Each structure stands twice: as C-alpha cells, then as structure tokens.
Amino acid sequence: MSAGSGDSAPGGGARSGGSGGSAAGGEARAFRDVAGLLASGVAIVTMEAQGEVRAMTANAVASLSLDPMLMLFCPAKKARLARHLERMRQFTLNFLREDQEQLSSYFAGGWRESAPPPFRFVPSQAGPRLEGSLASIGCDVERVSDGGDHWIVIGRVITMHRGVEPHRPLVFFAGQYRAVDFSSGSPAPDLTQVLDEPPHVFYQH
Ligand SMILES: Cc1cc2nc3c(=O)[nH]c(=O)nc-3n(C[C@H](O)[C@H](O)[C@H](O)COP(=O)(O)O)c2cc1C
C-alpha cells in the first residue's frame, strides 16, 4: 500500500476528523440529506487483519477505472476498520441483495437482536468474501488517500464473483432500504457508439 502525496498515515491514531473547517450541524445535516438523494447499492467490505475477518457496511463505493480495473471505498477515519488500513493488503467489496438488509444493519453496528443474522465468509483470492451476495470484487490495495473525515481506499481488481441470478440489489436511498421495481426499464445509451461530443452549455456569472 502506498499513501498518496500529502496524506498522513491511516490507522492507529487516525481517529480525529478531517482537514480544514468542519460544517456546522445544520449544514452537515442538510448536506447528508441532499447527498442521500443519490441512490446507491450497499456493500459489505471484508478484509482479514491479524488473523480475524473485519467487515463493515459501506455505500461510499464505486468502480473507478476500467484500465487498470480499480475500485474504491471510503471508510470513516473513526471507523474501527480504518485502524487496520495500515496493514491491509487486500479487501473484498460484497454487493448485497435486496433480501440482505439485515446484514447491512448488522455490519453497520445497528443490529438489536441477540443472535446475529445468518452469514458465512468463504475464502477467495483477495481474502474472505461474503457467501451469497449479489456479486463480490476482490482487490489488492493500491493507494489510500485523504478524503476529509474519511479515507479513500483504492484497490486493483484481482478477482470477481457473480452471485446466482436473479440479480436484485439492495438499494439505499434517503436513509432507507429499498428494492428496485423491475416491472419496467429502458436501456441506457451504448457509449461505445457515441461519435459526437455532447452539447456543452456554459453559464456566465
Ligand atoms: C447503508 C449504509 C451505508 C454506509 N456507508 C458507509 C461508508 O461508506 N463509509 C463508512 O465509513 N461508514 C458507512 N456506514 C456506517 C458504517 O457501516 C458504520 O458506521 C460502521 O460499521 C461502524 O463502525 P465501527 O463501530 O466499527 O467503528 C454505512 C452504514 C449504512 C447502514
């Protein structure tokens, strides 16, 4: 793992917040509410540290680059998982199915039942992966960069696993778990066929 330029080392003492000023309470809540209008899937990040499996629910997850194939996720600096970033060499992003919201709550620390929901980790090329998920992508850690009160962990894809069909994702939107209505849909454009630049509109202030 190599730290990006200007980063301080993650792990150990990295419990403090981000760089620069922090948003006032009301503003931060408004930001959270507005940013939460971008629907996302839900992933469980799994990794092995000191002989134990660590797992955390995350939706700050994205596919970053096709060539090379890169993924990213963003753990809060104060999350327990972030303490292990310094030694983390690999991680797996396990995308949840619509009927796995219990696992999302469990691995986010929001589970209130005495017995955990059923789950199993199985070994893969990039360490443990969550059995039965929609899909899993395993990565070697490429870089960890600073992202305010979060870290941006970039990984090079080394293994992929597609779960059995049907592929019905768990969706997170406006603070709620949702499911996709598959009764209708329309194809997105095939961008490999696009020849022209799209029109750009510039606004003057
Ligand atoms: C749907 C959902 C998405 C989340 N996404 C993230 C995320 O991207 N990054 C993050 O640091 N925490 C995220 N969290 C919160 C963490 O899962 C939770 O704070 C963490 O597991 C608690 O960590 P700790 O008790 O181990 O420190 C999310 C929680 C939920 C329910």
Image (spheres, rainbow, N blue to C red):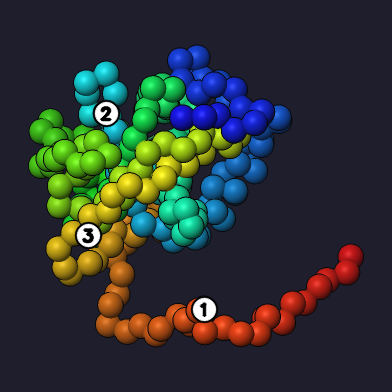
Q: Residue at (14%, 40%) from the top-left corner?
A: 122
Q: Is residue 160 left or right of residue 27?
A: left
Would you place residue 186 above or below residue 10 in this image? below
Residue at image position (16%, 68%) is 165
Residue 162 is marked as 3
Horizontal placement of 137 versus 70: left or right?
Answer: left
Within 10 Å of disc 1 (Cα), the crowding (few <14, some 14-19, many 20+) is: few
Q: Which mark is residue 191?
A: 1
- Is residue 7 visible in the rendered structure shown here? yes
Residue bearing mark 2: 48
Q: Earlier in the sequence, mark 2 or mark 3?
A: 2
Give the mark, 1 or 3, whose residue is nearer the N terminus. 3
Residue 186 percent across, percent down from the top left = 39, 85
Mark 1 to mark 3 CA distance (whole Å): 24 Å
Report the disc number at residue 97.
Answer: none
Q: Amino acid at mark 2?
A: Glu
- Examine the image and state in which quarter residue 81 appears: top left
- Specify which label sits upstream in the sequence, 1 or 2: 2
